[in-house]
Image (cartoon, rainbow, N blue to C red):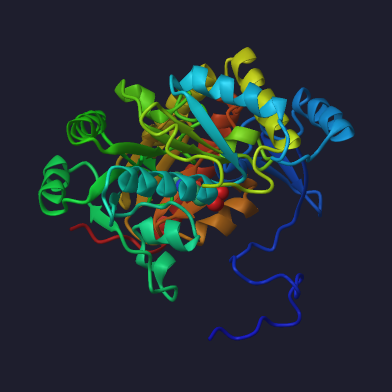
Amino acid sequence: MNAPAPADRPDPHVMQTYGRLPIALSHGRGCWVWDTDGKKYLDGLGGIAVNTLGHAHPELVPALQDQIGKLIHSSNYYQVPLQEKLAAKLTELSGLTNVFFCSTGLEANEAALKIARKYGHDKGVERPEIIVYEKAFHGRSIATLSATGNPKVQAGFGPLVEGFVRVPLNDVAAIEAAAGSHLNVVAVFLEVIQGEGGIHPASTGYLQAVRRICDERGWLLMLDEVQCGMGRTGKWFAHQWAGIQPDVMPLAKGLGSGVPVGAVVCGPKAATVLGPGNHGTTFGGNPLAMRAGVETLRIMEEQGLLENAAKVGAALKAGLAKELADVAGVVEIRGQGLMLGIELARPCGELLGRAARAGLLLSVTADRVIRLVPPLIVTSDEAQQIVDILCPLIKSFLAETPVKSA
Ligand SMILES: Cc1ncc(COP(=O)(O)O)c(C=O)c1O
């Protein structure tokens, strides 16, 4: 059992499930936030790929105020016209057909897993199995942590949910082999760019091969775009770079620009699998959440934020690559658009605090990958400032304990 939290910490009544920095943010504007002591930070994290429009966006704020003044929550007992509006937009942008709304990423994934199982049962598969991936992250409910490919996330929560077959990413032979030995497979479930696992993209060829295999075998292709979707890579959805369509696509994070919104967008093979009574959630699709989604998409379109993500993301990646070229201990810079990871040769969690002290918010994932997922409104000048703050920190960090060459 973990020791009780010390009484002298600032939040003695909050359950200690996070390792937090001693910083409390009070307000923000654009890509900048301020803490309660007045210190200013450049936001390279965007609330972990959530604050699509940055902070206090001048068009989002009045729209949300308007909605709060009218109706925050009703109930799914009644029609919610804003659900139809957001669903119509998401289906238009994805080419899929129907949407179920919830509030978080794990909820969207939980719904996807239920769709896959029911799809299997409807076909007469009594014990359906789903192919999932090493290093995947799908959430922390019992089912989604079972689908997750990280033993640290799973430790202490067994018995895990059964019915998952795990394969390595970007290995077509492995999925073919799994298909040969697991005759109850009904779906493949993967992130187009693995986020928490360390910014590992599925290759275009791999995504196309998995789509083909799913078509040949009558499986559902389920793409978790909770982190990499919503314009972050420069297209609405990351899989669109590969010219394919999924059957099921969970979304969340950036969809509501900070207001909790989750969605499962489905194509014809999956859209009618769940019927009345099969699934539901109290908060899902409430008017405030839907207004946040509708306005986020509208502002993204009007302000060309996909183009901005592609352009500024490419400049940011190039800037990092130039500054960190030939730096011993920098293993690789990966990702696309405004979803970038810099892998170092050793664990670098302490860079989180050092970057914050230098006025930059970021995250470190998979122990040794610095992750940048700033708001999609970030400018080229701000991207350069990220490079200017971060690269010297990385260099001095690596210089402290030189990494032995292999
Ligand atoms: C790809 C992916 N799926 C699911 C989740 C879980 O989302 P949430 O934390 O909203 O439950 C995350 C969160 O980081 C994620 O990155």
Q: Residue 88: where, in percent of width, then height? A: 57, 20
Q: Is residue 76 left or right of residue 267?
A: right
Q: Which residue is pictured at 38% across the width and 47% down the height? A: 118
Q: Quadrant of residue 49?
A: top right
Can residue 192 be seen from the camera position used here?
no
Please state, as top left, top right, bottom left or bottom right, where the C terminus lies in the image: bottom left
Q: Residue 149: where, in percent of width, then height? A: 34, 58
Q: Is residue 100 left or right of residue 167?
A: right
Decide: is 55 above or below 300. Answer: below
Q: Residue 257: where, in percent of width, then height? A: 65, 35
The one nearer the camera, 272 or 162, is 272
Q: Quadrant of residue 71?
A: top right
The one nearer the camera, 187 or 118, is 118
Q: Residue 235: where, in percent of width, then height? A: 45, 22
Decide: is 285 above or below 132. Answer: above
Q: Quadrant of residue 220?
A: top left
Q: Is residue 309 left or right of residue 289?
A: left
Q: Which residue is pictured at 58% across the width and 58% down the height? A: 353
